[in-house]
Amino acid sequence: MRFTSPKYIEEIAAELKRNFQGPVKHIVYGLSEINRVETGDLIFVDHPKYFARALSSKANTIIINQNVEVPAGKAIIFSETPFEDYNKLCSIYFPQAEIGAGKMQEISSSAVIADSVSLGNNVQIGAHTKILPGVVIMDNVEIKDHVIIGPNAVIGHHAFYYNTKNKKHSPMNTIGGVKIESHVEIGAASTIDAGVSSYTTIGEGTKIDNLVQIGHDTVIGVNCIIASGTGIAGCVTIKNNVTIWGQVGCASKVTIQDNVTVLGQSGITKDLEEGKTYFGTPCIEAKEKLKELAVLRNLPKLFKK
């Protein structure tokens, strides 16, 4: 998430009472977790497995718990507790408003919102949008025009994202939100989690059925169809005109290319190629999966021989 105005690393390090290595006037533009980092962001890393990835990422500032060589154009803040310091910065620069305060709401006069709808802070609702009874819209949610959100949907609940140490799970502060483009429909009791530090995004014209879960920082393209009972994990990229039928599960950090169809009750564990139809768990091209099933059906006959 971008700061309202850029910060110098000297200021940020002072807030944390940490030492840094880099130019005093090194500029930081925002905070991010590593999966959706933008150029000029600050991220943290506290495990050697991810040091190389963090240091070579778009981030220009890294909070890290080990002495490392500072890459050109970057700065380092040294900390024994990078995760805790990152969360502290989230609280300082992106403080959460009181729940239900209703601050900074922009709602079109033509939007239709049921009386029982709950609206958070920094919410925008576009023209001719309909939000049905029982919907909960949390902070930092932008909904464009001609959107329909079904009863009891929850938009922008905090990201399911934890840092695990010594068998304890600590939540990362959620400072992101949700963006829903025009002509989107979201079914009853569906849930779309906020991005950790960016936006979970639903592209124009996409239709989401009842009882669908969309994880944090997932980006869904235009004119997609997602049927009931589907669960999409965090940081998934779904391109345009994708159809996902009912009760599909999708692992995190997967990319699904344009014009893909995933048949019902499939499990997506890796990237899917453009224009193909997939089936099974883990899913493969449907025609290959159907051949496998045909072979399995014939196994009893082979044993009889």
Image (cartoon, grey):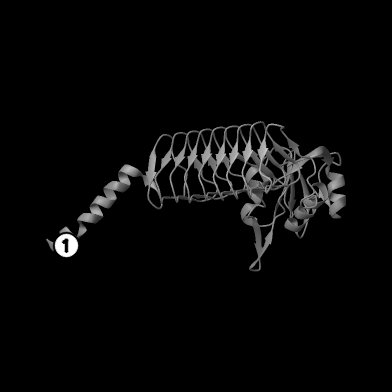
In the rendered view, does 118 fall on the left or right side of 217?
Answer: right
Residue 146 versus residue 284 in the image, above or below: above
Q: Residue at x 43, y 45 (%)?
A: 245
Residue marked by disc 1: 303
User: In the image, residue 43 lies at what x, y percent?
Assistant: 72, 47
In the rendered view, does 66 fall on the left or right side of 18?
Answer: left
Q: Nearer the viewer, residue 240 or 28?
A: 240
Q: Nearer the viewer, residue 136 or 77?
A: 136
User: In the image, residue 14 lies at what x, y percent?
Assistant: 88, 51
For the C terminus, the image quarter is bottom left
- Dividing the picture into quarters, in which one does residue 28 lie? top right
Looking at the rendered structure, the kind of residue marked 1 is Phe
Point out the residue furthest to the bottom here. 166
Q: Nearer the viewer, residue 172 or 159?
A: 159
In the rendered view, does 85 fall on the left or right side of 148?
Answer: right
Q: Residue at x 57, y 36 (%)?
A: 184
Q: Residue at x 28, y 52 (%)?
A: 293
How would you rate the neighbour count of disc 1 (Cα within 10 Å): few for under 14, some for 14-19, many for 20 or more? Answer: few
For the N terminus, the image quarter is top right
